[in-house]
Amino acid sequence: MTDPDGSSGATRRSAIEVELKRLEESAMYSGQMQFELTKQWRSVNLWLGVPASVLAALSGAAALVSTAGRVPAGILALVASGCGVVLTTINAAHRMNQAAAAGNAYLEIQTAARQAREIDLPYLSIEEARQALAELTARRDEQNKTAEPPNTRAYKRAQRNIDSGGQSYAADATTTTAGR
């Protein structure tokens, strides 16, 4: 069977398979970077939120203990307020949740691309395979529009996690070994 452009269906199927692999890899890296951003924002939230709460409690206690404690209480209250202002301004909790949701969305795309490539592709017509690829590409592109761009640290940590086998499944090792 020949496609309108003169290429064989096997050639197009192979090209679709390669593109599904690219999509899967792209989603894997994007997801890992978003999870690294989640960790970073969680740390920021804790490093600013906990001291702000403790300092606010200490300033209240210092103010209640004696009138001599008014100056230290005021200083503690100002520092606690400053931590709170920074925390509110950068909105670390929201960014943490947003990055986690984006990471999970990328994992969904990664899984769908792998399943489309390994399970469905051999049984789909070229048109159906092309449609599946287009839908997954659209999902990835839509997710890219809403995900926070990763910083260099998130990129490097994601790369290290993937390189150390953080995206490996025991089933893949068994399948590879059994297939030899």
Image: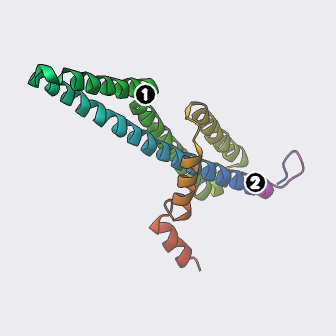
Q: Residue furthest left?
A: 65
- What amino acid is found at the position of numbered circle 1 in the picture? Asn
Residue most extreme to the bottom: 180
Residue 103 visible here: yes
Residue 133 % position (x, y): 66, 44
Residue 90 percent across, percent down from the top left: 45, 28
Amino acid type, label 2: Ala
Measured Cα–Cα span from mark 1 to mark 2: 43 Å
- The quarter of the image holding the N terminus is bottom right
52 lies above or below 107: above
> How was this image coloured?
rainbow
**At 9% from the left edge and 25% from the top edge, which residue is drawn?**
65
Residue at 39% from the left image edge and 23% from the top image edge: 85
Q: Which mark's residue is nearer the viewer, 1 or 2? A: 1
Nearer the observer, 40 or 14? 40
Residue of label 1: 91
Q: Is residue 112 visible?
A: no
Q: Which tag, 1 or 2, sits closer to the chain's start?
A: 2
Which span of residues is magenta-colored? 5-11
Whether the magenta-drawn stretch holds residue 10 is answered as yes
Query: Closer to the camera, 139 or 157?
Result: 157
Q: How many marks?
A: 2
What is the x, y in percent for residue 52? 30, 31
Q: Is 50 in front, or is 76?
A: 76
Q: Which mark is residue 83?
A: none
Q: Position of residue 34 (x, y in %)?
A: 51, 43
For the residue labelled by badge 2, is the local secondary structure a helix, a strand or a loop? helix
Quickly name the residue at label 2. Answer: 15
Residue at image point 59% right, 80% down: 180
Q: Is residue 40 left or right of residue 132?
A: left
Q: Residue at x 25, y 21 (%)?
A: 74
